[in-house]
Amino acid sequence: MTLQVNGNAAARWVVNFNNGNVNDNHMNNNACVRAVRASEYQCNAAVSLKQLHDAWLKARKGKKPSVNQLQFDNNWSGNLLQLQQSINDCTWQPLPSTCFIALKPKAREIHAPDFSDRVVHHWLVPQLEALWEPAFIFDSYANRKGKGSHAAVARLQQFIRQVPKAYYLQLDIHNFFNSIHRPTLWAMLKRKLIKVGASIQVLHATHALLKQHPLQQGASYRCNDAERAAVPMHKRLENSASGCGLPIGNLSSQFFANVYLDALDQFVKHTLKAKCYIRYVDDFIIVHSDKAQLQQWQCDIEQFIATRLQLKLKQDIRLSPLTDGVDFLGYVVRPTHTSARRRVVSHFKVALAGWESQHVTGQTVTATPESIRHIRSVIASYLGHIKQADSHRLISKINQRYPWVSAVTANLKFHHQLENTLVTINTGTTK
């Protein structure tokens, strides 16, 4: 890295980054970035071992250790030093990922990055978030601190109650993650990173995640033929168009998705001037009293995402009165109340009935500790979702129909010698 002086445009640092006119000022600025004050962007020129150690701890937190992680942890200090050198030398590249299939609510590929790549993500993404978070609109709710699906549903109901006799337009991006155009995304990221004087290490790591297809380094598939066949061909990352596609399951992809659709958010809020607009990943809703206005906005949005983001809408476009209820993020939101989606409740009851048929007889539960822990986590997941809705009567009916639920969800602890053996729990009630 050397200093290049060019008349009045001094203090440009030459970097080994072949990206043409990085300053977007119609001048020959190839491989040059402008130095800025440290207060504008807090990032060391080189990644420190402490930064990577912190990222390693975050990557491990709350995760059941995989074989890949255990291998990394076995020599964590040496592996962190190796990562530090590759990042600082600008030679770091993502490693092959592991793909498995999630079948519910619908079949889709999940690409788990190599654990060392996860460490890099936890080092890089918080720095990028610090830059973009202040610019994101308030009503973007996916993968952001203090937001989330429950906050999005509450905000939607707030919009609905402001104009209860209005209409809603609900749109979704077709095959979103596989359709993200990486060169367009990189141009968005590069412009801001250069402007704030991001280090060459941050620039290189960000570009390394986007400059080639995510499967360029290869992938191992941990799924059987039937599971893989359940994923439609156009939903597979390997079949994404040239220059397109981000892997679902990466921390970096979640952030990049918000950056990519921030252009849409700004367009809807500041050009269309839609006040009641909310987005969660690629699912977004506008509430307005004029149905014709929503129809016009739909056309405007369709044209904008096609020309600016190379995206298109799903054919399932909903333009309906708010009194019909808005099906959003597993809930049906109405002006008067919010209820859990019927499909979610149905899946919960099927899970309870299936476990009951195998392990419950009268007032007695017979199962292994592992099986009890599993159903306990299933119950906690569904109830955590359902309780966010107006669901007192629903929960009462579930407890009445499945009285053993309270017994298995009690704070039970099992001696390690009981693992893999059947234990008996008396529910104390008559089914």
Image: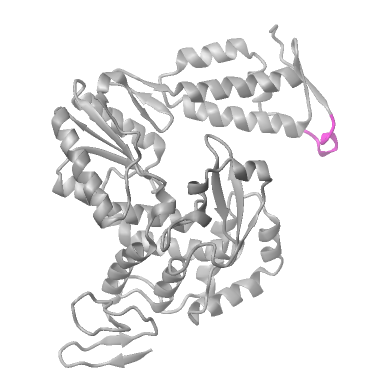
State which quarter of the image contains the N terminus.
bottom left
Residues 172 and 6: in front is 172
- Magenta run includes residue 417: yes
Q: Looking at the image, is 187 positioned above or below residue 360?
A: below
Picture coordinates of residue 34 (x, y %)?
A: 26, 81
Which colour scheme appears in the figure? one colour
Which residue is depicted at the point 28% across and 92% down? 4
Identify the main secondary structure in magenta: loop
Picture coordinates of residue 283 (x, y %)?
A: 35, 40
Q: Residue furthest top?
A: 430
Q: Quadrant of residue 224?
A: top right
Q: Looking at the image, is 215 positioned above or below residue 329?
A: below
Which residue is depicted at the point 72% across and 17% down? 357
How many numbered discs?
0
Q: Is residue 12 visible?
A: yes
Q: Is residue 413 visible?
A: no
Q: Which residues are magenta?
A: 414-421
Residues 297 and 314: in front is 314
